[in-house]
Amino acid sequence: MNTKPLAELLRPQSFEEMFGQKHLVGENAPFRKMIENVSFSSFILWGPPGVGKTTIARIISKDPAIHFIRLSAITEGIPRLREIVKKERNIFTSEKKFAIFVDEIHHFNKKQQDFFLPYIESGEVTLIAATTENPSFYLINPLLSRLNVFILKPLEKEDIINILKRAIEKKGEWTQRDFELTEKGFDSIIALSGFDA
């Protein structure tokens, strides 16, 4: 039995496996085409918890044409940011796009946000950020003006049902118990989830 958390076991590995956010990751969605063609500039994913922001970033990170660094705004400071950019700058001159993903970017203060400006302007770094908070209130205007904002919608009931069905299909990977979920069980879990995957 796998010891990974259930959320990690069920995390989609491709856009095809995602439930919800079809306006972004659907087969003909402009956002998805932009990602698949590696023709994107810096952007932020804004939406409630558990709707796919980090999953989208992880799917992007699998592209061999992208040199991808993942950071948490909760734990990283200016010295670490400076160290990463200094060490990885040579990626800019190669064939690969250099992307830094900052989760929970609303936790960065003004000075930390300012740090990215010259690198985004020069094209040396492509910033991919995620937040549950309204970027207009938490990001400085100079940074926000250089980011495309993509809004993720709350998941719908059908999305949660499909996620639960996937969990049941993979139950041998995360539990040794044999069980079935009744319609009432589905409804109870959906009600408790708050539409957070």
Image (cartoon, helix red, strand yellow):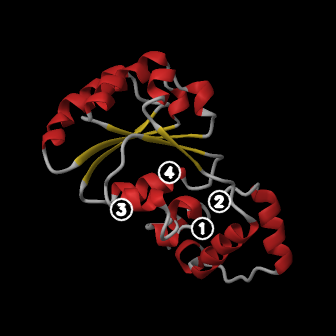
Quickly name the residue at label 3. Answer: 36
Q: Residue at x 32, y 52 (%)?
A: 39
Quickly name the residue at label 4. Answer: 54
Question: Mark 2 is on which residue type?
Answer: Ala
SS for callout 1:
loop
Q: State if disc 2 and disc 1 touch (CB < 8 Å).
A: yes
Residue, far right: 184
Quickly name the residue at label 2. Answer: 197
Q: Residue at x 20, y 28 (%)?
A: 86
Label 3: few (<14), some (14–19) or many (≥20) C-alpha neighbours in 10 Å: few
Camera-nearest label, 1 or 2: 1
Q: Earlier in the sequence, mark 2 or mark 4?
A: 4
Q: Earlier in the sequence, mark 1 or mark 2?
A: 1
Q: Above or below — where is 150 with respect to 112? A: below
Pick the residue in front: 7 or 153: 153
Tell me the number on the disc at residue 162: none
Give the CA distance from mark 3 to mark 4. 17 Å
Give the CA distance from mark 2 to mark 4. 12 Å
